[in-house]
Amino acid sequence: MSSDCCRCRQFLAQMLPAEIDMGDQELPDWLACHAGEYGLPPFLSELARLETLVDTMAEDEYDLTPPTKARVVNPSLQMVQFPWRNLVAILAGRDDVARPGEQLVLVWKQSGGAVRYKNAEAQDLLALKLIDDSVDLAQAAQEHQVSLAYLDTMLERAAQEEMILVPVTTIRRDATIFKESELTPASYLSSNAFTLQWHITQACDLHCKHCYDRSSRRAVAFDQALAVLEDFRSFCQQHHVYGQVTFTGGNPLLYPRFAELYRAAAEHGFQLAILGNPVEKAVLEELQDIQPLEFYQVSLEGLASHNDHIRGAGHFQRVVDFLALLKGLGIYSMVMLTLTRENQDQVLPLADFLRDKVDLFNFNRLAMVGEGARLLSAPSQGYEEFLRSYDEASAHNPCMGLKDNHLNTLFVRQGREVFGGCTGYGCGAAFNFLSLLADGEVHACRKFPSYIGNISDSSLTEIYHAEAARRYRAGSRACDGCSIRAVCGGCLAVTHGMGLNIFADKDPYCFFD
């Protein structure tokens, strides 16, 4: 036989007494002419046509380089109409019988060399049409009466399968400052996702002793908030990243029309999360019905007595009860602790207490900013030992997360692989996230004054690429040449809180040689 169609050969081997001489004919053509003569299944010629296409595509070369500006249809993709249904399942070895009926099949080659084939679904065809015709997604959403989130999800699936090719992210570290090294691979130099940490209101039902901003900022009006979502969507499209909106405050749930804003953000296709305080079950259920939360983060500052001293009487138990509520609703829960001199010895006991109550527990060092300036930071002397104890405990406690950038110094000394640090890319200030305050100010990081623009004057894209943001993104010159800079960079907020120059001085907790 002249064809490599292995699946078809299996049928022929079972049904023919000996190998047949097909002459110069290709297997699909021979089967079309002689299947009836030899009592072969009538669909076999079409199966051979599909399998020949797959085999040929596997041998052919295609330019599958990601585009630079906009999504494109995979140049190898072919749509083929067949008069038999179930051929895909037969070729994949999941079935042996085809049924008469028209079936459109998609066949394409992926960047790794594998050839994929599947029955075309309505979502596949719509995704391909949107990209091939360069259709405006907002207009398409209106025409098809679906949300932008629906179209985004559909296109994302097509991109994951490589039916469409997408540009690589342009959220990339400055190559003159951040270098790939044996310790920090290239994956830490660019981000496929971007977070808008939106402090939607200053209103809060707590008055914590370490709050970094109790100033009165008037929240943007609802129509302005909707414009922010449009602007952020444009930012994500221009930079080829997935967007997440993390609502916080204050207490974001105290924003007058929060549920409406949450729905609008969901309809724009963003992943959504909340950094807030405990709320009623009905509130959570309403949000979950709109779009499931990626996570809900609350705070604890130590064991019950110390926590309630910082956050108010009864707060500890309310959080514990709320964590049980989150678990019951299937919402990923997170607890954050602000590390101070007073609560450092409570971190491990608290983590042990939370072992079966929370999905993820982390800590951030205190930035002595705002009312937090009245508290004392954890001592820098002995900080390495604290991190070592935390790391050792985390090996036996699944809820304990790794977040502090200086853990990477510890890992290097132990010959272990580094991790992404605070934001997945070391200090992510003005890199893979921006902080938007209630009144429209944009900061590189919310934990200290780091103004880089205002949405009333500029778009998020303009703010991100302005010189002010670039300075924060570059971090401290004291980190120049450090082999783990891309996954560390210290903490600018902590450095600022200690009265140092964040652009010239090193994080005082750094113990990297």
Image (cartoon, rainbow, N blue to C red):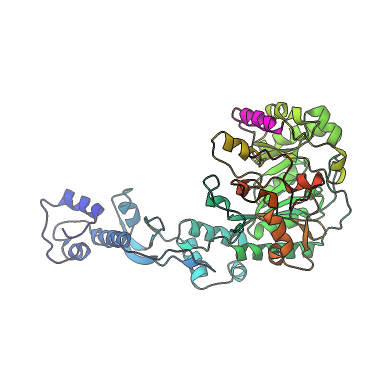
Query: Is 330 included in the stretch rendered in magenta?
Result: no
Q: Which quadrant would residue 386 be assigned to in this image?
A: top right
In this rendering, would 219 be left or right of 399? right
In percent of width and height, residue 285 lies at 70, 45
Residue 357 visible from this viewpoint? no
- Vertical placement of residue 397 versus 270, above or below: above
Magenta stretch in the rendered image? 383-399
Query: Is 384 included in the stretch rendered in magenta?
Result: yes
- Vertical placement of residue 305 versus 500, above or below: above
Q: Quadrant of the C terminus?
A: top right
Q: What count of labels does the image hold?
A: 0
Q: Quadrant of the N terminus?
A: bottom left
In percent of width and height, residue 204 lies at 84, 46
Q: Nearer the viewer, residue 492 or 72?
A: 492
Q: Which quadrant would residue 413 be assigned to in this image?
A: top right
Q: Nearer the viewer, residue 287 or 208?
A: 208
Q: Nearer the viewer, residue 349 or 137?
A: 349
In percent of width and height, residue 323 lies at 71, 35
In this rendering, would 147 be left or right of 335? left
User: Mainly helix, strand or loop, the magenta region?
Assistant: helix
At horizontal 72% and vertical 26% (from top left) the residue drawn is 349
Residue 2 visible from this viewpoint? yes
At horizontal 34% and vertical 62% (from top left) the residue drawn is 101
The outermost residue toward the bottom is 133
In percent of width and height, residue 426 lies at 64, 47
In this rendering, would 256 be left or right of 114? right
